[in-house]
Image (spheres, rainbow, N blue to C red):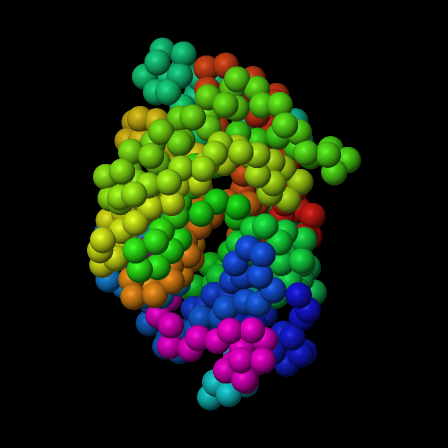
C-alpha cells in the first residue's frame, strides 16, 4: 500500500491532533482501507458493552470501562473506501483548512526506566500473579506491561499505519483517534467477532513462539497447548450459547508478524444480529487477555497488575447489525502521544510459567510495533 497525496497525508496526520473522531483500518489480506469520520465534536461514550446492541459505527473499547476510559463509538458521518474516495471525502470537508492548523496537545514524557528497573517491576508483578495460580484460585492470568519509545515532530501516524499494512498483511491494521481515547495504532491478529447476516466467526488465539530465520516452529510446549485449550474452551461455550451449527477448525499454527500462535476458528450462525453487544460483552475479555475464571481473573488484574492498560487488550473495529461487522482484540498496539509512543504487550501465566520466558515473550510481541518506529 502506498501513501496518498501529500495534502491528504497532512490532513489525516493533523486529524490525530484535532477534536474530531476518526478511524482508518485495513482488514487482513486486502490492500484497501476504510475511513470513518464523525463531523461533529460530540463524543458518543458508552458505559456498558451491551449498549452496542443495534448500534453502527467504529468502536474502541478499553480493557476496563471507567469514567476516564469509556467505550467510544465513532458515528459514521463520512465513510470512504480506498484512497481515491478517502481523498475526495476528506479534502471536501468544510473545516479541512482548520484541521491543518491543529497543534499537538502537550504530554509529559514518562521518566525512562532502564532495562533492569523495568524487569524488576515485571518480576514483582509476576510473583504477585503466581500466588493465586499456585493456590488454584484461578486457572490462568494474563500479565502485561508497557514500554515507551520517543518520537519526534516528524513522526507521521499515517506513514506508520502504511508501514504496518505493508509489513503485516495477515493482521487487521487500524489508526483511531478520539479526544477521549487519544490516538491508537495497532496491528492485531485476533478476531473478537466478525461476520454478517447469519454467518459469523470468532477465534481462540493463545500460545506464542518467535520465528527465527523465517522458519516457523511447529512443536508446541505443554504450557502453550494448555493455554490455548483454556481459551478455546471458554470461546466454545459462548458460541454454543449464542449460535448454532458451529464448525470448529484447529488448533493450528498461525503466523502474526515474526511470531506464531496456536489458533482455533469457530464458525457459527446467529439468528438475530440486533444483540451483538450482548455477545461482545460475554466474549470480552477473553482468557487470551484476561484469564479464567473470568471475573476472578479480571478483578485480580485490575487490582494487582500495577498499571492502567487503558485501551490495550480492549477491542476495536466496525460494528453494523445490518451489514458487515469486523471487531478485533486490541493487541500489538501503541498509544501515540506528542513526544512518545507507549507500547503494550502481555502473555498468559500458568503455574508452570517461568518469569524470564514470559518477559522475553512480551518483548518479542512489542517488536511488532517497535519495528515500525
Q: With respect to residue 137, does 270 lie above or below?
A: below
Residue 298 appears anywhere in the view = no
The answer to if 81 sits in the magenta stretch is yes
Q: In the rendered view, does 61 fall on the left or right side of 372?
A: left
Q: With respect to residue 326, does 257 lie above or below?
A: above
Q: Position of residue 118 (x, y in %)?
A: 60, 31
- Total number of numbered labels? 0
Residue 86 appears anywhere in the view = yes
Q: With respect to residue 309, does 297 lie above or below?
A: above
Q: Which residues are magenta?
A: 71-91
**Going by the picture, which residue comes out furthest to the right?**
213
Q: Residue at x 52, y 58 (%)?
A: 27
Q: Residue at x 52, y 17 (%)?
A: 222
**Going by the picture, which residue comes out furthest to the top?**
135
Query: Quarter-wise, where is residue 104 in the image?
Result: bottom right
Which of the image's four quarters has the N terminus? Answer: bottom right
The answer to if 3 sits in the magenta stretch is no
Q: Position of residue 179 (x, y in %)?
A: 42, 64
Q: Position of residue 55 (x, y in %)?
A: 27, 63
Q: With respect to residue 143, does 63 lie above or below?
A: below
- In front: 292, or 333? 292
Q: Position of residue 346 (x, y in %)?
A: 51, 34
Q: Residue at x 63, y 37 (%)?
A: 259
Q: Residue at x 40, y 12 (%)?
A: 134
- In front: 319, or 344? 319
- In front: 52, or 95? 52
Amino acid at each position: 500500500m502506498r501513501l496518498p497525496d501529500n495534502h491528504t497525508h497532512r490532513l489525516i496526520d493533523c486529524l490525530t491532533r484535532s477534536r474530531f473522531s476518526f478511524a482508518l483500518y485495513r482488514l487482513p489480506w486486502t490492500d484497501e482501507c476504510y475511513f470513518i469520520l464523525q463531523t461533529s465534536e460530540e463524543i458518543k461514550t458508552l458505559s456498558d458493552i451491551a449498549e452496542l446492541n443495534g448500534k453502527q459505527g467504529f468502536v474502541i473499547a478499553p480493557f476496563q470501562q471507567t469514567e476516564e476510559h469509556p467505550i467510544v463509538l465513532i458515528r459514521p458521518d463520512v465513510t470512504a473506501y480506498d484512497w481515491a474516495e478517502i481523498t475526495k471525502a476528506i479534502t471536501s470537508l468544510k473545516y479541512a483548512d482548520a484541521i491543518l492548523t491543529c497543534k499537538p496537545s502537550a504530554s509529559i514524557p514518562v521518566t525512562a526506566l532502564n532495562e533492569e528497573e523495568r524487569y524488576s517491576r515485571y518480576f514483582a508483578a509476576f510473583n504477585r500473579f503466581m500466588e493465586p495460580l499456585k493456590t488454584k484460585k484461578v486457572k490462568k492470568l494474563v500479565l502485561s506491561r508497557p514500554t515507551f519509545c520517543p518520537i519526534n515532530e516528524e513522526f507521521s501516524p499515517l506513514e506508520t499505519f502504511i508501514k504496518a499494512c505493508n509489513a503485516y498483511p495477515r493482521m487487521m491494521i487500524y489508526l483511531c483517534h478520539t479526544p477521549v481515547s487519544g490516538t491508537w495504532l495497532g496491528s492485531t491478529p485476533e478476531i473478537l467477532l466478525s461476520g454478517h447476516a447469519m454467518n459469523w466467526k470468532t477465534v481462540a488465539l493463545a500460545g506464542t513462539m518467535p520465528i527465527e530465520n523465517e522458519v516457523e516452529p511447529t512443536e508446541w510446549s505443554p504450557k502453550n497447548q494448555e493455554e490455548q485449550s483454556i481459551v478455546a474452551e471458554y470461546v466454545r461455550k459462548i458460541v454454543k450459547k449464542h449460535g448454532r451449527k458451529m464448525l470448529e477448525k484447529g488448533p493450528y499454527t498461525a503466523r502474526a508478524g515474526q511470531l506464531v500462535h496456536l489458533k482455533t476458528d469457530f464458525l457459527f450462525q446467529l439468528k438475530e444480529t440486533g444483540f451483538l453487544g450482548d455477545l461482545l460483552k460475554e466474549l470480552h475479555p477473553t482468557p487470551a487477555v484476561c484469564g479464567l475464571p473470568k471475573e476472578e481473573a479480571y478483578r485480580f488484574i485490575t487490582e494487582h497488575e500495577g498499571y492502567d492498560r487503558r485501551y490495550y487488550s480492549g477491542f476495536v473495529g466496525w460494528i453494523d447489525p445490518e451489514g458487515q461487522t469486523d471487531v478485533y482484540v486490541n493487541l500489538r498496539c501503541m498509544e501515540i502521544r506528542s513526544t512518545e509512543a507507549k507500547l503494550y504487550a502481555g502473555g498468559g501465566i500458568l503455574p508452570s510459567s517461568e518469569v524470564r520466558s514470559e518477559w522475553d515473550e512480551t518483548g518479542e510481541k512489542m517488536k511488532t510495533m517497535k519495528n515500525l518506529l
